Image (cartoon, rainbow, N blue to C red):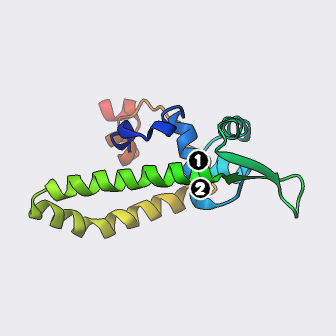
Amino acid sequence: MRALRQERPPAAAGLAAEHSSALGVVVFAGPISIGALARAERLGAPAMTKTVGILAEAGLVTRERDPKDARVVRVRATRKANELVLRGRDQRVMRIGKALQALPHTETARLEAAIGTFEKLVRDLESATVGKPLAPTRSSRSPREAAAGRTGSRARR
């Protein structure tokens, strides 16, 4: 995604990556509460409230009270946001398609064979993190040590 973000549509150029990410969730999830959006983006409610304010100021989302519970604020994407996000997605899909066409047939066959396994891995990872607190983003362990469940000091012995 980092490589694909290099070619962002001009209208999205003013948005930080975290704002674009939150906007994508709003567009694809439909009207969503700020709390649910914060959980989806793994942010606290105050940070998401600020992000929603930035998106609203840019004319990309609107806030509305939930008709069943006035304490809940739902965020809805505007037409401008839908067009922006969908255009960006289409551009990324086209770029990936061109890159795939440039690969030799043997490489695309290997990718096709691995897709099911990769999708299962993603589902497993997502279901394992639902309702659990976030792990620290920095660790003294290398990724290999972390995957093996070892601490950095023990691994160096």
What residue is at 62 percent from the left and 54 percent from the top?
79
* Quadrant (top left, top right, bottom left, bottom right) of the C terminus: top left
Which residue in the protein does label 2 denote?
A: 27
Q: Residues within 10 Å of mark 1 (few under 14, many from 20)?
A: many
> Which corner quadrant of the image does residue 50 belong to?
top right
The relative height of residue 62 versus residue 31 in the rendered view (above or below) is: above
What residue is at 65 percent from the left and 52 percent from the top?
77
Q: Is 14 on the left-hand or right-hand side of 53?
A: left
Q: Position of residue 119 (x, y in %)?
A: 38, 65
Q: Position of residue 42 (x, y in %)?
A: 60, 45
Amino acid type assigned to the residue bearing label 1 in the image:
Leu
Q: Position of residue 30 (x, y in %)?
A: 65, 61
Q: Are marks 1 and 2 in contact (CB under 8 Å)?
A: yes
* Quadrant (top left, top right, bottom left, bottom right) of the N terminus: top left
> Which corner quadrant of the image does residue 110 belong to?
bottom left
Which residue in the protein does label 1 denote?
A: 23
Q: Position of residue 6 (x, y in %)?
A: 36, 36
Q: Residues within 10 Å of mark 2 (few under 14, many from 20)?
A: many
The relative height of residue 110 versus residue 153 in the rendered view (above or below) is: below
Which residue is nearer to you in this view: 11 or 133? 11
